[in-house]
Image (cartoon, coloured by chain):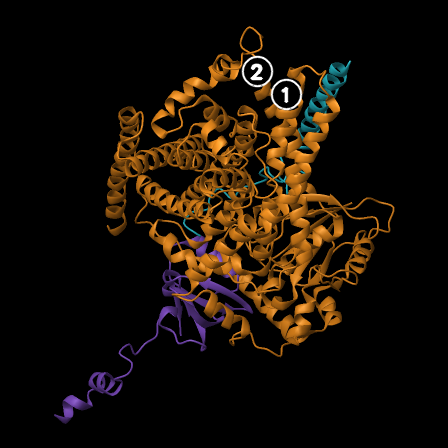
Chain colours: A purple, B orange, C cyan
């Protein structure tokens, strides 16, 4: 029994009852008002990546969700506010 | 000397341009208002040199990196037109993003002067920027400006600095090393270092009291205005308020006075002419010219109020939020929230609305929006709505409101159809929209916008509409042998013979009368012509009453003269509203479609939609109100069925295309 | 006599209208009464042709 319960997987699963997703990988899973660092933009749309870059949205830059409006997220990057949809939020990988 | 105004979108370039040149180019508080370059000479009061200085306003850009497609206009301008000086308008509230572009501009070798704009907002936010230090770091002069300010807005100083640097050569503070401009990775790396450089500058010169990533009062506003459940009702309420103020409350009040004057003028001229004038000339002058134009000018106050309110709306920053609110509905029909902005602009005039679609990146979405924007009743269509609401529905407010809701419905339906036909129903696109700060709309700017629009309207009325009315009058007075047409033989006139074939086509819609057909046709030159032509053709010059806005004095007379039931009138109104717009707007569509096929499809779609909507309204309405179907039911039904059938066929073809695309995507 | 005057007035009005329209066309106001079209802003300058899938 001890062997089973001490297993790391079991500990993680049963101790973190409030957070079924241990890892927050993309922005749509992020908490509001908490600053994260962008890890990557996961999309095959090159132009989108370039556009985001010119806004200052690139690897290493700070990003925060200010609020959730309807299905859109209001985020702030480099002192400016933007509204992005869920698809885009899922494409922004954070850590 | 040529001076280019560059900078991020929505940083205040066009406002600055207007202040420098005295022009009134369109401004709005969202990214993407300016889509083309505009030129103007800088005012003498600011330009103390002996040379003429031409300012060129360019659309906003975030960078000049070679691999982004959007910044071509700035690139091309700088490369092809060799400006002498660049004024870089930098939004002082967002230094760290703005300076990225600034450092790129500084590398071009052209002298740059930075206008640190919106400095008044910084004072409010208690952000302090050391401009001397900034100027030292950037190696170019920095001038604080408030482009929305009256006097003391920094412009004099700005132009003075421009004059001073115009002879010197610009040194670049940041030199990208070893980059291969062809290799994307290399450019990206260099840009990352550029950002680091910018960050270091910002750290040195800026002291922020309020951190950007904390919720502020503005965010609280957003939470309410763009709320999941409240957002749409609030938007609907705002729009309803705009319409009712212009059409029902304030507009008609002012219109009454104006109409009184027009009536008086008519009588005056009539009196002056006396009895010895040939009835021909008298009719032409009184009914053709004064009556026709006068009928229209009576509606001017409604249009002015509309434009005033729209300007306030566009200035306060709400538009970007509207895009967010409507995004989820537009997503269902293959568009995005960005499409709402051209449509709201289209409430004023469809032409700038259609042009505003240029900011939509996705080609199909842009073309779809361009073709659907004209369905929103524009300012020119207002008189038509007001006229019919007045004559047939006792000025009821629901008529106008219904037209707008119907327009939205048609737009959504149209978008859904188009996305199916193009086979792109499974394609996805991302939505990202910058949310500018709310600001109190400027009454002054709104008033200027309203007055300039009023002037344009009067000019249009006095030229195009006047000519059309005169021609129409002549065409209905004479027959082909240039004899005057007898009282009861109006249908032998030139006009009648031309319009009658079209009138036959309109029989199933309830208005197969040549006068109405003629009015609709002239509507393609300018939608206001519908009212003008009707006034001329029915000789109803006294139908403008001084107590109520329109009609009376025989509203029943007019209805009788037109020979329409209320249902037919409604159907006629809808046909004029939801068919192709005026030629000028079609021209704007052509510019945005960039494809003859799409243009033809767009106009065809609009024509078909107008026909179908009018047909259904008339036939179903007549059936409900009188228990029998209207005239021309069978031929109309055939036509409508063919049209709908064709569209369904195209949808089916599109769905097949979508399926194959899906297969390719997943494999 | 009156006819002449009235006729002259009508012709003057119409001529004025036509002249105004021609002068507007020359200035390049394609959008027949759009106040925002000073200096040919209704014409395209350059378009990013390869814009796809972004909105």
Q: Position of residue C9 (x, y in %)?
A: 74, 21
Q: Where is residue B442 in the image (x, y as percent from the top left)?
A: 66, 59
Name the N-terminal-most of marks 1 and 2.
1
Residue at 73% x, 44% y: name it: B40
The residue labelled by disc 2 is B477
Splitting the image into 4 quarters, where does residue B460 fall?
Answer: top right
- Contact, mark 1 vs mark 2 (Cβ under 8 Å): yes
The secondary structure type at the circle numbered 1 is: helix
The residue labelled by disc 1 is B283
Q: Is residue B62 visible?
A: no
How many angstroms separate mark 1 from mark 2 (CA)? 9 Å
> Alpha-carbon neighbours of circle 2 within 10 Å: few (<14), some, or many (≥20)?
many
Q: Which of B590 and B666 lies nearest the eye of the viewer?
A: B590
Residue at 35% x, 41% y: name it: B418
Residue at 27% x, 85% y: name it: A16
Q: Which of B278 and B532 lies nearest the eye of the viewer?
A: B278
Question: Which chain letter goes with mark 1?
Answer: B
| B301 lies left or right of B655 | right
Q: Which of B250 and B159 lies nearest the eye of the viewer?
A: B250
């Amino acid at each position: 029994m001890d062997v089973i319960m001490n297993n790391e997987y079991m500990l993680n699963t049963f101790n973190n009852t409030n957070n079924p997703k241990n890892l927050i990988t993309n922005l749509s899973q992020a908490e509001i008002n908490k600053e994260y660092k962008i890890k990557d933009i996961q999309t095959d749309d090159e132009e989108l990546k370039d556009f985001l870059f010119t806004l200052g949205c690139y690897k290493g830059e700070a990003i925060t969700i200010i609020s959730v409006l309807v299905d859109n997220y209001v985020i702030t990057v480099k002192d400016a506010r933007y509204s992005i949809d869920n698809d885009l939020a899922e494409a922004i990988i954070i850590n | 000397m040529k001076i280019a105004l560059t900078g991020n979108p929505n940083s205040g370039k066009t406002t600055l341009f207007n202040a420098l040149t005295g022009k009134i180019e369109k401004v709005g508080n969202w990214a993407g208002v300016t889509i083309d370059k505009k030129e103007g000479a800088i005012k003498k009061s600011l330009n103390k040199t002996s040379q003429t200085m031409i300012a060129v306003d360019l659309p906003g850009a975030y960078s000049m990196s070679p691999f982004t497609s959007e910044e071509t206009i700035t690139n091309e301008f700088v490369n092809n037109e060799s400006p002498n000086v660049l004024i870089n308008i930098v939004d002082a509230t967002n230094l760290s993003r703005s300076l990225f572009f600034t450092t790129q501009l500084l590398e071009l070798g052209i002298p740059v002067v930075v206008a640190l704009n919106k400095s008044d907002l910084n004072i409010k936010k208690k952000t302090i920027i050391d401009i001397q230090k900034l100027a030292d770091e950037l190696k170019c002069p920095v001038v604080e400006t408030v482009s929305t300010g009256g006097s003391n807005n920094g412009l004099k100083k700005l132009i003075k600095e421009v004059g001073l640097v115009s002879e010197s050569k610009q040194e670049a503070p940041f030199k990208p090393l070893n980059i291969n401009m062809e290799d994307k990775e290399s450019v990206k790396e260099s840009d990352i270092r550029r950002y680091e450089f910018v960050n270091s500058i910002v750290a040195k010169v800026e002291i922020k009291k309020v951190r950007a990533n904390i919720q502020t009062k503005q965010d609280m506003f957003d939470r309410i205005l763009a709320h999941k459940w409240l957002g749409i009702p609030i938007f609907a309420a705002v729009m309803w308020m705009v319409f009712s103020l212009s059409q029902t409350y304030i507009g008609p009040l002012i219109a009454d006075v104006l109409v009184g004057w027009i009536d008086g003028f008519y009588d005056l001229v009539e009196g002056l002419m006396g009895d010895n004038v040939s009835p021909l000339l008298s009719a032409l002058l009184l009914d053709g010219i004064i009556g026709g134009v006068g009928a229209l000018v009576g509606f001017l106050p409604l249009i002015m109020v509309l434009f005033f309110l729209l300007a306030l709306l566009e200035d306060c920053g709400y538009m970007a939020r509207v895009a967010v609110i409507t995004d989820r509905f537009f997503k269902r029909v293959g568009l995005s929230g960005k499409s709402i902005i051209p449509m709201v602009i289209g409430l004023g005039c469809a032409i700038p609305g259609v042009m505003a679609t240029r900011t939509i990146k996705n080609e199909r979405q842009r073309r779809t929006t361009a073709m659907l924007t004209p369905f929103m009743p524009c300012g020119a269509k207002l008189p038509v709505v007001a006229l019919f609401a007045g004559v047939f529905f006792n000025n009821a407010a629901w008529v106008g409101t219904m037209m707008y809701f119907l327009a939205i419905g048609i737009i959504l339906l149209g978008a859904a159809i188009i996305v199916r036909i193009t086979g792109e129903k499974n394609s996805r696109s991302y939505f990202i929209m910058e949310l500018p700060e709310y600001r109190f709309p400027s009454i002054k700017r709104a008033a200027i916008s309203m007055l300039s629009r009023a002037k344009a309207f009067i000019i249009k009325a006095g030229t195009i509409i006047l000519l059309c009315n005169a021609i129409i009058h002549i065409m209905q007075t004479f027959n082909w042998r240039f004899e005057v047409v007898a009282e009861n033989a109006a249908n032998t006139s030139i006009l009648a013979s031309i319009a009658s074939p079209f009138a036959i086509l309109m029989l199933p819609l309830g208005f197969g009368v040549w006068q109405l057909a003629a009015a609709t046709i002239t509507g393609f030159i300018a939608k206001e012509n519908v009212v003008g032509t009707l006034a001329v053709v029915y000789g109803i010059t006294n139908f403008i009453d001084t107590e109520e806005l329109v009609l009376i004095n025989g509203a029943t007379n007019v209805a009788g003269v037109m020979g329409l039931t209320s249902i037919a009138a409604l159907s006629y109104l809808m046909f004029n509203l939801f068919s192709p717009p005026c030629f000028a707007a079609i021209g704007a569509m052509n510019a945005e479609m960039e494809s003859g096929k799409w243009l033809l499809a767009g106009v065809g779609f609009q024509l078909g939609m107008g026909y179908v909507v009018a047909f259904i309204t008339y036939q179903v309405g007549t059936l409900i109100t009188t228990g029998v179907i209207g005239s021309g039911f069978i031929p109309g039904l055939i036509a409508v069925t063919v049209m709908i059938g064709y569209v369904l066929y195209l949808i089916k073809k599109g769905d097949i295309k979508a399926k194959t695309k899906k297969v390719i995507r997943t494999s | 006599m009156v006819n002449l005057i009235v006729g002259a007035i009508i012709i003057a009005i119409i001529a004025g209208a036509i002249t105004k329209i021609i002068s507007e066309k020359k200035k390049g106001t394609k959008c027949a009464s759009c106040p925002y079209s000073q200096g040919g802003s209704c014409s395209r300058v350059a378009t990013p042709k390869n814009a796809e899938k972004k909105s």
